Amino acid sequence: MTFTIIITLCGLLLVAYFFDVTSSVTRIPSVLLLLLLGWLVREVSRLMQITVPDLSPLLPFLGTVGLVLIVLEGALELEFNHSKKKVILKSFFSALVPMVILSILLAFAFQYAGHVSFKEALNNAIPFCVISSTVAISSAGNLGGGDREFVIYESSFSDILGVLFFNFITQNEIINLNTAGRFSFQMVLITAISFVATLGLSYLLSKISHHIKFMPIILLAILIYAISEVYHLPALVFILLFGLFLGNLDELKQVRWIQLLRPRELDKEVKKFKELIGELTFLIRALFFLLFGYLMKRSEILNPETIIWACGITVGIFLIRALFLKLMRMPLSALLFVAPRGLINILLFLALVPGPTLPFINSSLVTQVIILSVLVMMIGVIQKRGRKPDVPPTANEEIHWSTSPDSEAN
């Protein structure tokens, strides 16, 4: 039995790796293939009458660890300097404004359909309104350099802002100045914790001489994240700041106290650290979506009671996104379709499940919205014509994000 499990897992992960490698050629998001593969494994095991224990408790664990690693991986890739000011601002507002607008509109629809309070309806709406960095970043390789950079910023901001928005609404029975003040204090506190923890972890990374040095840093980062979540602090802010700090050491070398961290030696270690994070992110992401696909049921995918809601939510996602991108004078052809739902949306939904949910807000609706949004992204990426994804951004692309008349106009 042990070797059967090992063979099965290794085989599935190798297939997942094949999906990841070939996605830039086939333009089919690897996430969609992983869900299909997981579902096929379930059907085969059922037909062969293979008894499998309940694996559903593993889903939140893999999702939480995967979210931390994906945000960290994205933050390590981000350049945070003056030349990136416009793309950072645009991606921030592109993550925030459509999410808030869609949440409010969906909340009104849920309130009307479910005859509940607006706050309860908003609780149920937010999980559908966040762009999944898990799916978006892994699919961003199919875009050009400037667009790929925007997607990484936008989806990372969306995850963080979405979790903050969700926690703020669900953890406060009454929204007033007191709750806003408490939330502001939490932001200040997590920023201070992030500053101290980032310096401490960076110092350890530069000083540890043992041959095992990266795993303790990763485990400490996840530990700090988990403890912060237990005390209802916006823990993803720490992961983002930690990744941004390590990924932008070149911009900080002029700061005198940074020299205590030996930035030249640390920069070499960060490159190795990035590679390890990339490997671990692939592993956890693949396991998560394989497991989610395995846990999907045919009745959930084809549930006629939720498909109308799923189609309506998907249309709303891309309609609001199109209007906002048009307003911001950003390229519709490249960015419109890259608003997938995935890991973060499942985690937010699972956070709702112990509490009150509306009758039509269930795993079927979440599954259908994820599949439909990924299918729309796949169709959009396939239809997009242009440069191959691995070509670095050209001078024209840099101008597009920094000094174009349209950008200045905004």
Image (cartoon, rainbow, N blue to C red):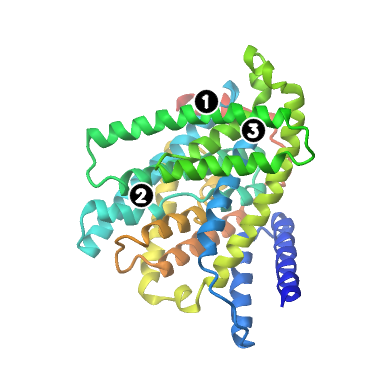
Q: Residue furthest front?
A: 210
Q: Name the residue carrying label 1.
A: 405
C-alpha gap between disc 1 and disc 2: 29 Å
On the picture, is 404 further left or further right than 26?
left
Q: Nearer the viewer, residue 280 or 25?
A: 280
- Residue at (51% x, 48% y) in the render: 336
Horizontal and vertical percent position of residue 85? 54, 25
Query: Which mark is in front, 1 or 3?
Result: 3
Neighbour class for label 3 at 10 Å: few (<14), some, many (≥20)? some
* Quarter of the figure that contains the C terminus: top left
Horizontal and vertical percent position of residue 359? 30, 69
SS at badge 3: helix
Neighbour class for label 2 at 10 Å: few (<14), some, many (≥20)? many
* Quadrant of the image occupied by residue 163: top left
On the picture, is 38 further left or further right than 227?
right
Q: Nearer the viewer, residue 194 or 37?
A: 194
Q: Nearer the viewer, residue 239 or 142?
A: 239
Horizontal and vertical percent position of residue 240? 54, 36
Q: Name the residue carrying label 3.
A: 397
Looking at the image, residue 337 lies above or below residue 217: below
Neighbour class for label 1 at 10 Å: few (<14), some, many (≥20)? few
C-alpha gap between disc 2 and disc 3: 30 Å
SS at badge 2: helix
Q: Name the residue carrying label 2.
A: 102
Q: Earlier in the sequence, mark 2 or mark 3?
A: 2
